[in-house]
């Protein structure tokens, strides 16, 4: 049974994947699904199906993606929570990296072959609203919380570590 779902939300270059990779390295029982390469619902569904085929003995599931609107957060949580390994007692934690487009632009420079500058500059961003998310979920959960992180400009060493995330 999966006890914890952590949904990471933020612009490219905010630090979500770096946070997830550190959490993964420091804990057994953690599975990280990185949705960065998913272009549509079919890709999302395939990634989720693939992950649940291989996930055994996992207590914490990290969902890493942009998820910049409350609608997109509800959508991914409903897809994940339809699995029978998720119960209403599963703790859902939403970790939001606050909107800081300038820091994300600085962090994104040279990080990947394809820069995310257009997304960072133009993406629609909504702060997490737990009331909207709770109403949109297909079932209620006993523990639905949000934590906020500030986006900081990374040092050169941190940029090297985050390459390929």
Image: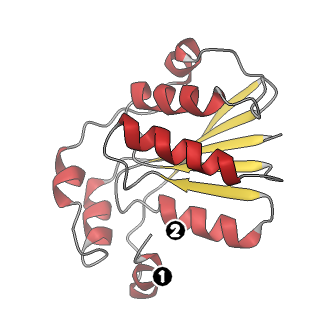
Residue visible at 41% across and 24% down? 71
- Corner quadrant of residue 109: bottom left
SS at mark 2? Answer: helix
State which quarter of the image contains the C terminus.
Answer: bottom left
First in sequence: mark 1 or mark 2?
2
**Vertical placement of 34 versus 73: above or below?**
below
Marks 1 and 2 sit apart, C-alpha to C-alpha, by 8 Å
The residue wearing badge 2 is 18
Relative to 63, 144 lies left or right: right
- Pointer 1: what residue? 161
Residue 133, x across and y down, in percent: 53, 21
Can you say whether 32 is above or below 156 in the image? Answer: above
Image spot of residue 28 (x, y percent): 80, 65
* Label pair 1/2, CB-CB below 8 angstroms: yes
Q: Horizontal and vertical percent for residue 90?
A: 77, 32
Residue located at (31% from left, 63% from top): 103
Establish if 132 lies above or below 160. above
Residue 105, can we see it?
yes
Residue ID at (29%, 69%): 108
Crowding at mark 1 (Cα within 10 Å: few <14, some 14-19, many 20+): few
| Relative to 145, 71 lies left or right | left
User: Is residue 95 visible in this depiction of the protein?
Assistant: no
Q: Nearer the viewer, residue 52 or 99?
A: 52
Which SS class for mark 1? helix
Lateral position of residue 128 relative to residue 25, left or right = left
Rendering quarter of residue 151 = bottom left
> Could you say which is closer to the camera, residue 112 or residue 131?
112
Query: In this orientation, which residue lies closer to the viewer: 107 or 64?
Result: 64
Say whether residue 159 is left or right of residue 111.
right
């Amino acid at each position: 049974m999966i006890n914890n779902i952590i949904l990471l939300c933020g612009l490219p270059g905010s630090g979500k994947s770096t946070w997830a990779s550190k959490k993964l390295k420091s804990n057994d029982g953690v599975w990280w699904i990185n949705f960065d390469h998913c272009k549509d619902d079919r890709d999302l569904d395939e990634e989720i199906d693939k992950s649940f085929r291989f996930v055994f003995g996992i207590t914490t599931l990290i969902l890493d993606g942009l998820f910049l609107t409350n609608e997109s957060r509800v959508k991914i949580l409903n897809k994940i929570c339809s699995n029978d390994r998720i119960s209403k007692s599963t703790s859902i934690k939403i970790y939001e990296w606050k909107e800081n487009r300038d820091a994300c632009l600085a962090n994104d420079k040279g990080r990947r072959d394809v820069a995310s500058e257009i997304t960072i500059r133009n993406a629609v961003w909504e702060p997490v609203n737990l009331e909207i998310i709770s109403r949109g979920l297909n079932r209620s959960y006993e523990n639905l919380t949000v934590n906020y992180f500030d986006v900081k400009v990374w040092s050169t060493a941190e940029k090297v570590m985050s390459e390929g995330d």
